[in-house]
Image: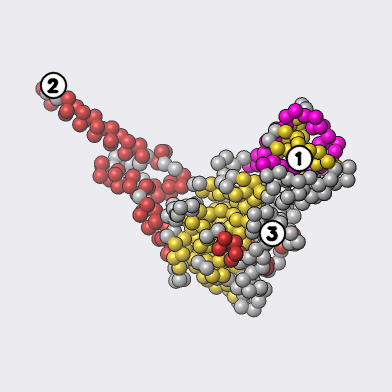
Amino acid sequence: MDTLLEKTEFSLLERTCEYALTASLFVILVLTNPFSQTPILANDLLANTATTTPTLIQASKNVKGYVDPVEVKNRFNARIATKYKGLKVNDVAEGVKHIKMVKYYNGKPVRINIVEINRQVAQGYEVKPAIAASTLANKRTVRTIAQNTNSIVAINGGFFKPQTGVPLGTLMINQKIYTGPIYDRVALGIFDDGYEVGRVQLDAKITGNGQVIKIDNINQPRMLSSYILAYTRDWGKYAPASPQYGVQLQIVGNKITAASANPLSIPEDGYVLVGPKSQLGKLFGAECVNVEINTNPKWENVQHIISGGPYLVKDNQIFIDMTAQKLQSIGGRNPRTAIGYTKENDLILAAVDGREGSSIGLTLGELANLMKSLGCTNAINLDGGGSTVMYVNGQIVNHPAQPGGIALSNALVISKKNGG
């Protein structure tokens, strides 16, 4: 204080430097405060609980630890090395690891292939679903889907109608809904900065003539004659047959352009609604109609959704709701495919071989325990059995019963970003 009283005048330059230093220190202290950091990084603060104010150099190092890509990469590599100690870890690409393992259940072997990706490290790649062809009623092998999408990794995706290849359950790619949910089954939502899981419901409606009419599903086979279904060009050129006493409405923009009891052509820039005339007839003569399509949970900014079922891990706990999702038929010991993610936002893909002496497969309970042991805070089952296939860098790395795997509807791929 004495010094301040004696030196009552400072040059403008001296004050400017003092204020700049104070401001810089304030910003650094705020950034290193536990209350200002994102939950994903919160665990990194546990070893840093001293109450003393860090020095400017220490604070700078702390800030660097959270934003430096090299540090993020080193942490990912360290996690993988610790988790899979004693196993060979193959580098598929930077931030993408492939691990083979054999576990024993009641003295019998199970072959397991694992891929882990951290998208903060693998910035040149994206994770997304992919369909077999330009329309839904098609099937291709995982290898073909991977090659068509320039992918370094691919696994089989969700359930599908075997006769046609149409996905059975929620499927969204690049924010476009291809198919709606079946039995509100659980799905994985893929965001730019992470993942979420939840049982998905469709929340869709069409309004016109002062009426609000529920749309029950999108591009799915009819389950009840009372349902109103929307079909886009992803389904094909024509909508399926109307139910008894049903009608179809062809809609482009906000206008009804055709109505018929017979199958209508699906416009490139529109859709066809198919359902009971008692409901859709309320829209006859409407000057304008409007469609709203949402999901519940309402995942804002979700980029992709792929569904499966049942849950395996929910909020860090083993949770298998096979009956609730009407999946009793997939019990027993079988080849399995699963996806899940960790608290560090590492995505885990798993393919388990089964139905042979050298690999007997897993029950859903064993699969759930496997995913939890790998660090998954949430995980779900995907299609399995003959569909279970994992592709890594041009090779099928597991051993499906049919060499190369069967033709199927959709896959989850790790592919190069556009321009990547």
Number of other residues with Cα within 10 Å of mark 2, as a class: few under 14, some 14 to 19, many 20 or more:
few
Dot label at residue 9: 2
Disc 3 is placed on an element classified as: loop
Residue at the image point whose x is 42% and y is 55% from the top: 121
Q: Mark 3 or mark 2, which has the lower sequence index?
A: 2
Which residue is the site of mark 1? 250
Q: Is residue 242 magenta?
A: no
Tell me residue 221's x, y (percent). Answer: 77, 51
Span colored in magenta: 269-297
- Give the alpha-carbon distance from disc 2 to disc 1, as whole Å: 81 Å
In this rendering, position of residue 304 left or right of residue 212: left
Where on the picture, by quarter, is residue 382?
bottom right
Q: Amino acid type of disc 1?
A: Gln
In this rendering, position of residue 59 left or right of residue 199: left
Which residue is the site of mark 3? 138
- Circles 1 and 3, Cβ within 8 Å, touching? The answer is no
- Give the alpha-carbon distance from disc 3 to disc 2, as whole Å: 81 Å
Q: Nearer the viewer, mark 3 or mark 2?
A: 3
